[in-house]
Image (tube, rainbow, N blue to C red):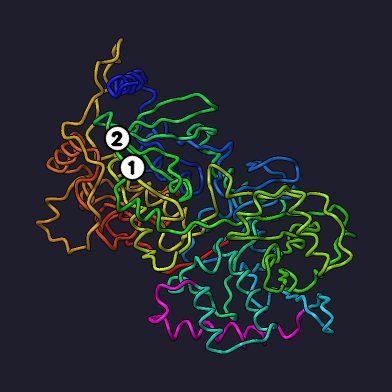
Amino acid sequence: MSARLGLIAAAAAVTAASSQDRYDAVIVGAGWAGIRAVEVLTTNGVPGDRVLVLEAAEHAGGRCRSRNSDGTTNNPNLRPRVVPHELGAEWNYDSGINRQQDALWPDYIPSRVWDDQDYYAIWPTWPGKASYYRRKDVDGSGQKVMSKMERKDGWMAELWAPFLQFREDNLDELAGLSYGEAIEKYIQGKGWKSNDKLQFLNMVEDAKHLEYGTGDRDMDITEIEFTDPTFHVETNYMGVPGVGWGNVAAKYAQQFASNIRTSARVTEINQRLDDDYAVVRYLENGASKTVKARTVLVTVSVGVLKAGNINFVPSLPSWKRASIDAIGFGVINKCIMSWKDEKDLVWPNGQEEDRWFLMATPEDETSGRWTTFSNPSNFKGVASLTAWIGGSDAVEAEDMSDGEILGDVMRNLREMFPAIGEPDDVVVTRWGKDENVLGAYSYPSPGQDYYGDLRKIGERVGKIFFAGEATSSNGWATTFGAWDSGEEAGFDMATRILTLPKIEEEAEPSEPTETAKQPESTPTDEDPEPTQPTETTDSQSDEASDNDAGASASEPILATTDGSEPSEPAESTELPEEALESDAEVEESEPLMTESPPDGASDSDAGDSATEPVTATNEKVDPADSTGSPESSEQAS
């Protein structure tokens, strides 16, 4: 097909769309970022029938996926005694910066998640919550014997804590190295030859891989600060009967059921075919469909962006593509096992240290494969174990059958617990092969400007906004980071939508035009890379582009999600005429950003001024008084 005929065909598809296929906002993905954005948009002046969510999977929830003992997945109406098995995210941080937790409790997360259980340590290398086992040649015969390691606190204090101090003392010298290279440098400096010491460090490294889904050669020594072994963060285990993180996500999304289309995979977002709308193409149950949107929010994983599974027309700017390429995106998988008979629970289960079992193995080709196990039996009320694997080992294991994987897992378990029997139920994940995700979550690569890249991935490009854990500087790799990014993007989109000039919908022509509608000024495929921020003077703010139109004191006051009314603005909530005219002019002439987003800005101010609202979930906040999110970072598995 010639380029001209292709253009005419594209125009025909666009002009054939009915007025019902035009939206103020189309959201790509119904994970935590996407469904949070829906609520913010629809509670801040954007009509619900003008918001559409396109989710490629069969259910909402994204990387929170609960496979339940009643055979359902992400069930919003789970019965209280049904046991969920968490294929993806499994914990919720009990953190002062976790707005997601505050919003979901107690309507979506019951109080018993906090009241009726002890806090569950998310890091298996925290000594108080783990038992260590070691395969050792005890008599020189070459026969390996598995035994429980005593003095685990001493091992951590003698070997791991000094390495962390070495890292802190030599950050300048170590800059640009991976964790693996830094550990090698440390071992060489110590002159260690003891297999016991090397074995222990190898075990700790293997467990740490599960926090990021990658090997020590891929993790940046500067950006990743593995905590001191005495450090403890409180988390809540979500896989208890009647709950489940994926089920909670589905329950939260249920209120927007009329907005969400599942099994709808977006394939292209085109900003060249229409001056006023982005044209979004997607496949729904195999059928090709098209909708138009005044704004689009992309919340897909970095893995999907890296793979180029969505065609952006024009192409994303080179600075954004470079950040997408630079950021790490790991793979973590699980082998989730449960036993129906309580007599099958033959492993230690009475103490806090029995929540994790770590297995130290010799440095060989099987080292670190399925050697970390979590034990949620007490929380689930049934005998349960989950084997974990991360990084390149996880990628390789995805080509194995479930039976082969279970065989490897059970061999390691029998070394620690000889009486253990075959599980009754087994679920094996393959997140790297899931075409809607292609991994687990983001992490800093060696030598990367990680927080700069997080910001750039989150920057708006024309009508397209971006959200997700890999755009959150204070919650990357967490569900609350995804939540916060969706909340902030929702506010930004609502502000933009409410300040854009109204479009009079025209009757559709009976026949398509000969050529596709082109912008008056054809955009290039490149936008300038973000520059360093400068202080904005009053005169500069008068000349603001559509990026910050509406961010003045007279912008619409956005409501909070708790149903309370916002405070009355000091001045009219309508934008000044000059701002509307400026915004309209930009929209009509240039779908892409014409000014660089400021370097160093947080995700929440992607393309917006310092007065853009970033609002705590259940508090009434005047956008003009809001501030950016904290800069502290937490990692989650």
Residue 102 picture location, percent across and down = 51, 58
Q: What element carries label 2?
A: loop
Front residue of 467/93: it is: 467
Counting every numbered tag in the picture gives 2
Give the Cα separation between the discs numbered 2 and 1. Answer: 9 Å
Q: Is mark 1 on a helix, strand or loop?
A: strand
Q: Residue furthest top?
A: 510
Residue 419 picture location, percent across and down = 89, 65
Q: Could you tell me which residue is drawn at 31 percent across and 21 percent down?
A: 2
**Side (left or right) of 557 relative to 212:** left
- Is residue 562 inside the magenta stretch? no
Q: Residue furthest front?
A: 141
Amino acid type at mark 2: Gln
The N terminus - image quarter: top left
Q: In which quarter of the image is residue 228?
A: bottom right
Amino acid type at mark 1: Ile
Q: In this view, does 298 lie above or below 459?
A: above
Q: In which quarter of the image is residue 52?
A: top left
**Side (left or right) of 586 relative to 558:** left
Q: Name the residue under label 2.
A: 271
Q: How crowded is mark 2: few (under 14 residues within 10 Å), some or many (20 or more)?
A: many
The magenta stretch is 149-178
Residue 58 in sight: yes
Residue 182 picture location, percent across and down = 49, 78
Q: How crowded is mark 1: few (under 14 residues within 10 Å), some or many (20 or more)?
A: many
Answer yes or no: do the residues labelled 2 and 1 have beta carbons within 8 Å? yes
Q: What mark, if any, has residue 526 been given in the picture?
A: none
The C terminus - image quarter: bottom right
Q: Name the residue under label 1.
A: 464
**Earlier along the polypeptide chain: callout 2 or callout 1?**
2
